[in-house]
Image: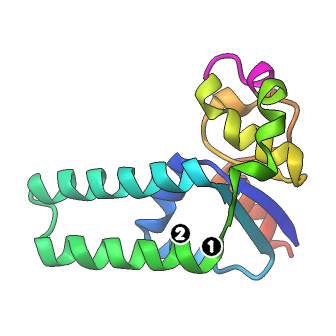
């Protein structure tokens, strides 16, 4: 079993794809996210879907279907962790991610559990926590 803290950008991208939603259901994964990450994800999902619909990629009905499927995946496969579990690690986490200190929550949660970070954001690389990109993670899980 792999314990992962999912970055908001990765989560948004994956819950919008059939492949990604199926991947989140992998029984070899235990995926966590902090409160602010989930809030950011839900906001960004609505924003991206609205933009895609406005650009004519799909109808309003399809937009709502995608949003429903994405929220179902988040609620089913992501374990929400309250900030009280990792807030005490904020100073250390901010030191570990100086290029984007707003991402401290993801690092703090990875330190608290402990778990690796699933991200495509290079700001997390070198933070002292294991990191996985989507491609590498998928390849690794094919071996399990």
Image-quadrant location for residue 99: top right
Tag 2 and tag 1, C-beta contact below 8 Å: yes
Density class for disc 2 (Cα within 10 Å; few <14, some 14-19, many ≥20) is some
Residue 99, magenta (yes or no): yes
* Mark 2 residue element: helix
Q: Which residue is mark 2?
A: 20
115 in relation to 111, above or below: below
Instruction: Please tell me which residue lies in front, 25 or 75.
Output: 75
**Image check: 139 left or right of 36?**
right
Residue 7 rendering spot, x and y as whole percentages: 61, 48
**Image check: 139 left or right of 76?**
right
**Image check: 95 left or right of 71?**
right
> What is the C-alpha distance between the residues marked 2 and 1?
6 Å
Tell me where the magenta segment starts and ends, as one range: 94-100
The N terminus lies in quadrant: bottom right
Residue 26 rendering spot, x and y as whole percentages: 70, 79
Count how many numbered circles sit on residues in the image. Answer: 2
At x 77%, y 72%, the residue is 29
Q: Which residue is mark 1?
A: 24
43 in relation to 120, above or below: below
Density class for disc 1 (Cα within 10 Å; few <14, some 14-19, many ≥20) is many
The disc label shown at residue 74, or none: none
Coloured how? rainbow
Residue 13 rendering spot, x and y as whole percentages: 46, 56
Q: Residue furthest front?
A: 84
**Image check: 96 left or right of 17?**
right
* Mark 1 residue element: helix
At x 66%, y 27%, the residue is 123
Residue 69 rendering spot, x and y as whole percentages: 40, 79
Image-quadrant location for residue 2: bottom right
């Amino acid at each position: 079993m792999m314990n992962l803290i999912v970055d908001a950008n990765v989560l948004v991208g994956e819950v919008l794809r059939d492949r990604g939603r199926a991947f989140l259901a992998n029984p070899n994964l235990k995926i966590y996210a902090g409160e602010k990450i989930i809030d950011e994800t839900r906001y960004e999902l609505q924003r991206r879907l609205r933009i895609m619909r406005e650009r004519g990629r799909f109808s309003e009905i399809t937009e709502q279907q995608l949003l429903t499927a994405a929220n179902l995946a988040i609620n089913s496969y992501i374990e929400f962790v309250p900030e009280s579990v990792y807030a005490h690690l904020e100073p250390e986490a901010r030191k570990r991610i100086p290029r984007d200190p707003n991402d401290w929550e993801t690092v703090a949660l990875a330190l608290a559990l402990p778990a690796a970070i699933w991200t495509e954001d290079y700001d997390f690389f070198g933070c002292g926590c294991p990191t996985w990109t989507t491609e590498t993670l998928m390849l690794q899980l094919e071996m399990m």
